[in-house]
Amino acid sequence: MKPQLITLHINGRTHALAAAPNATLLETLRDLGYVDVKSGCEKGDCGACAVLLNGEAVNSCMVLAGQADEATIVTATGLGTVTNPHPLQQAFADHGAIQCGYCTPGFVIAAKALLDTNPHPTELEIREAISGNLCRCTGYGQIVEAIQAAAEQMVPAEGGAR
């Protein structure tokens, strides 16, 4: 199979590369060094590989790299840094929503996608938004609490942006 030339815009950086026609976005991101995108089930069931693709949360194991040509991709690392974390990342740490951390990037991405479209979600809406993500360590109580706390913190000031 002949490689396909694609361009990916990831966390503010542009990558031009040749991708095999059957390469998933997950494989391509990991090959590029984006190890915060976790390889879990590789069949779209666990959410560990979730990224924002043009603003929408997707399981990168279910997207071919070629389908993401010229797309804007944000991984959990692209949201914040250790010294300046995104409010969601900080809330996950503050509320004990991280144990082993393997699932955390996918949960943060799912939560970011939710809060971008619904800044005041109910607990049920949060649970529905993260229903495609699996965690074997924390349970979901702390994760829901963290998202609720981040939503309260991220509420824009009158006329301001989030």
Image (cartoon, rainbow, N blue to C red):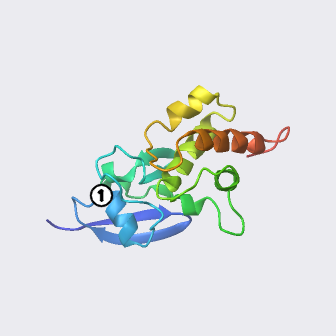
Q: Is residue 17 left or right of residue 128?
A: left
Q: Residue furthest left?
A: 1
Provide the residue designation for mark 1. Answer: 24
Indicate the position of residue 85 as horizontal and vertical percent values.
68, 61
Q: Is residue 150 left or right of residue 137?
A: right
The amino acid on which the numbered mark 1 sits, given as a three-letter code, is Thr
Q: Residue furthest right?
A: 158
Residue 125 sits in quarter: top right
**Residue 72 in view of the camera:** yes
Residue at (39%, 71%) from the top-left corner? 16
134 is higher (above) or lower (below) than 74: above
Indicate the position of residue 156 as horizontal and vertical percent values.
79, 41
Q: Is residue 92 left or right of residue 49?
A: right
Indicate the position of residue 123 as horizontal and vertical percent values.
62, 29
147 is higher (above) or lower (below) than 127: below
Q: Nearer the viewer, residue 20 or 29?
A: 29
Element class at badge 1? loop
Q: How many marks?
A: 1
